[in-house]
Amino acid sequence: MDLRFDPPIHPGEILREEYLVPLRMSAGVLARKLGVPRTRIERLAAEQSPVTTDTALRLAKFFRTSPRFWMNMQASYDLAVVADAKRAEIDAIPEMPAEAA
């Protein structure tokens, strides 16, 4: 099982590079439009915190995307980071024999 994404892309990078920069919008302005604390969007855009369910719903509404878009990015990032950190431990787990499946 290969779960590597080299390098993993944090949803905050997508928010920053694909949305905020092209729109010339600051994290503070976006936060006001979303009705959340400025620090929530600043930390997300700085790749210091994850996308929460609440934030995904708000980003989806504002940017006309889907909440799944944001949550799937976060889940993919989390899987890549943890898979890398736990690689030896996961590799040591035996696989169920094919005939038992």
Image (spheres, helix red, strand yellow):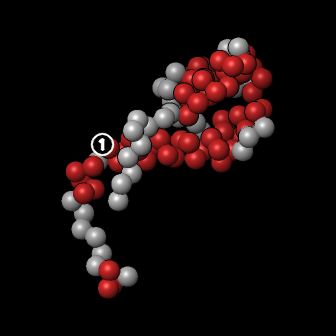
Answer yes or no: is residue 50 visible.
yes
Residue shown at the point (74%, 40%) measured from the top left: 65
Say few, some or many: other residues with alpha carbon within 10 Å of mark 1 (under 14 / 14 to 19 / 20 or more): few
Q: Name the image quarter holding the C terminus.
A: bottom left
Residue at the image position 28 percent from the left and 56 percent from the top: 90
The quadrant in which the N terminus is found is: bottom left
The residue identified by callout 1 is 85
The quadrant holding residue 6 is top left
Where in the figure is residue 16, as x and y percent of width and height?
Answer: 60, 23
**In what element is the residue under mark 1?**
helix
Q: Residue 49 at x, y = what percent?
A: 51, 30
Left or right, 43 with reference to 97: right
Residue 94 sits in quarter: bottom left
Left or right of residue 45: residue 59: right
* Residue occupying image coordinates x 69% and y 19%: 22
Figure check: 41 above or below 52:
above
Residue 40 can be seen, yes or no: no
Label 1 sits on what residue type? Answer: Ala
Residue nearest the viewer, comparing 34 with 99: 99
Residue at left 51%, top 46%?
A: 75
User: Looking at the picture, does residue 29 appear above or below residue 12?
Assistant: above
Horizontal side of 61 relative to 77 (left or right) equals: right
Looking at this rendering, what residue extends furthest in the bottom direction?
99
Whole-percent x, y for residue 42 in the image: 58, 19
